[in-house]
Image (cartoon, helix red, strand yellow):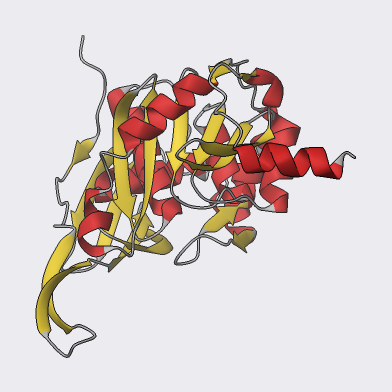
């Protein structure tokens, strides 16, 4: 039996546009730039938020935003998702409305997300109810996954100006989304998880952006136990990861990474050779 999907448009925009620019020699060149468009979310006719987005997965972005902010608890609560780029809006209609709408709208935090992310009090209230599974990661697996991910980032290679997020099961990339803000890419993945009935328990969430409290919360709401980033972490992000048990690995590039939380979950089975100069300096320091 097929699983439920709401009625939806398929209104993804092209991600890049060709423009003229001049290089350091004064030579005109045709280059690609990333798209960016405002998309205002209306839920049952009520305005919720405006997101600046690349626009490639607008329906999944809208669904994932409502999921991660805990405005809806199941995909079956949503009747339809209709994107209208001419009006720069997406209308999400539910079957029974949003419970406690006014209460949920009372407290909103503007986060460090690119393009300004938001966190509503209803998502914070549910945070410490989440139980994440225990995990075990091999160092060799991290290296293999990073190598696989190097084959993606198509929009970034063409135009720059975007972040990427990926949902990984083993070395399989279930979803890879690029957008002008990493929080948008994360929400789009949350929407795709519902639409495809993917569980987060046996997955790794990768992002090119920094691991802030907002990203930790989104991963936890998606039941994803491991975060992997090529960028850094924030203090609040690390403290929240420690509180709720998210394994946090960042500054991951090549053979380098730093485990900020959950080192007990890592099996060091592929340690790179220590450079001779580092060994010499260590011996000098210990004399």
Residue ID at (36%, 38%): 189
Asked whether 200 or 205 is in front, the reply is 205
- Residue 29 in percent (x, y) is at 10, 78
Outermost top residue: 1
| Above-or-below relation of 85 to 218 | below
Asked whether 283 or 160 is in front, the reply is 283
Q: Is residue 205 left or right of residue 37?
A: right
Q: Which image quadrant for residue 80? A: top left
- Residue 83 in percent (x, y) is at 21, 54
Q: Is residue 29 left or right of residue 216?
A: left
Residue ID at (56%, 16%): 269
Quadrant housing the C terminus: top right
Asked whether 283 or 130 is in front, the reply is 283
Q: Is residue 267 visible?
A: yes
Quadrant housing the N terminus: top left
- Residue 280 in percent (x, y) is at 72, 40
Outermost bottom residue: 26
Q: Is residue 99 visible?
A: no
- Residue 197 in percent (x, y) is at 33, 21
- How many numbered circles does the render carry? 0
| Above-or-below relation of 272 to 122 | above
Residue ID at (15%, 46%): 9
Residue ID at (39%, 19%): 170
């Amino acid at each position: 039996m097929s699983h439920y999907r709401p009625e939806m448009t398929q209104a993804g925009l092209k991600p890049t546009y060709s423009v003229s620019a001049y290089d350091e020699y004064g030579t005109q060149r045709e280059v690609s730039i990333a798209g960016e468009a405002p998309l205002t979310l209306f839920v049952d006719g009520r305005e919720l938020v405006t997101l600046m987005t690349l626009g490639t997965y607008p329906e999944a972005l809208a669904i994932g935003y409502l999921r991660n902010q805990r405005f809806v608890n199941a995909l079956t609560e949503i009747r339809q998702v209709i994107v209208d780029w001419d009006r720069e809006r997406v209308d999400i209609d539910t079957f029974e409305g949003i419970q406690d709408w006014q209460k949920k709208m009372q407290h909103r935090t503007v986060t460090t997300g690119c393009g300004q992310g938001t966190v509503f009090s209803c998502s914070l209230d549910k945070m410490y109810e989440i139980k994440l599974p225990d995990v075990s990661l091999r160092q060799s697996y991290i290296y293999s996954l990073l190598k696989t991910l190097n084959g993606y980032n198509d929009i970034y290679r063409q135009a720059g100006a975007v972040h990427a997020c990926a949902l990984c099961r083993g070395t399989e990339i279930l979803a890879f989304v690029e957008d002008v803000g990493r929080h948008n890419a994360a929400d789009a993945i949350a929407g795709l998880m519902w639409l495809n009935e993917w569980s987060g328990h046996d997955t790794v969430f990768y992002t090119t952006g920094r691991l802030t409290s907002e990203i930790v919360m989104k991963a936890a709401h998606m039941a994803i136990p491991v975060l992997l980033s090529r960028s850094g972490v924030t203090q609040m992000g690390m403290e929240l990861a420690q509180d709720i048990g998210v394994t946090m690995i960042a500054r991951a590039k090549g053979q380098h990474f730093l485990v900020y939380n959950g080192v007990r979950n890592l099996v060091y089975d592929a340690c790179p050779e220590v450079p001779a100069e580092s060994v010499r300096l260590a011996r000098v320091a210990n004399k």
